[in-house]
């Protein structure tokens, strides 16, 4: 499976409390406009050949971006959800590559955060 598909499946299977919808690659307009749901978007940021030998490569260095838009009604601690998300990825063999700070959209008053996860995938 592609990295995005694997990540969407991982987040969905983890049944993280507070996440209402998870999307890969594209965010439908109705999800982008939804202020009452916590929505996650997973996209690729890298898929580079790695692990060279015999004039070929046998591994991909993959990285994904995970963006969370919190519902305006989100009443739980965002940090608790984010730590659980990071642990789910780490326990599945990914590494936390970077975590950005939470920001507040001044127009919608929605809190959001962005994470980067990486892995080495043998092919």
Image (tube, grey):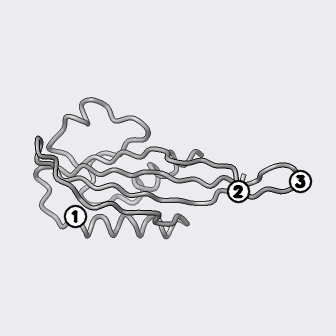
Q: CA distance from mark 3 to mark 2?
A: 15 Å
- CA gap between label 1 and label 3 equals 47 Å
Disc 2: which residue: 122
Q: Quadrant of residue 114?
A: bottom left
Query: How far from the left and from the top, in percent, is residue 46?
Result: 55, 48
Q: Please identify, in this view, whether the residue under mark 3 or under mark 2 is nearer the observer.
A: 3
Q: Which residue is mark 1?
A: 78
- Going from N to C along the chain, the mark reached first, 2 or 1, is 1
Q: Residue 101: percent from the left, percent from the top?
A: 27, 61
Q: Who's the residue at 87% across and 49% down the image?
A: 55
Q: Nearer the viewer, residue 116 or 5?
A: 116
Horizontal side of 75 relative to 51 (left or right) equals left
Q: Nearer the viewer, mark 1 or mark 3?
A: 3
Other-residue count near label 3 (Cα within 10 Å), few / some / many at <14 / 14–19 / ≥20: few
Q: Earlier in the sequence, mark 3 or mark 2?
A: 3
Question: Which secondary structure lies at badge 1?
Answer: helix
């Amino acid at each position: 499976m592609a990295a995005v598909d694997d990540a969407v499946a991982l987040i969905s299977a983890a049944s993280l409390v507070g996440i209402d919808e998870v999307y890969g690659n594209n965010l439908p307009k109705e999800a982008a406009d939804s202020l009452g749901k916590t929505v996650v978007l997973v996209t690729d940021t890298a898929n580079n050949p790695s692990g060279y030998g015999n004039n070929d490569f046998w591994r991909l260095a993959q990285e994904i971006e995970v963006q969370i838009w919190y519902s305006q009604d989100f009443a739980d601690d965002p940090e608790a959800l984010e730590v659980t998300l990071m642990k789910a990825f780490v326990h599945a063999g990914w590494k936390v590559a970077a975590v950005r700070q939470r920001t507040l959209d001044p127009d919608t008053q929605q809190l959001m955060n962005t994470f980067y996860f990486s892995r080495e995938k043998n092919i």
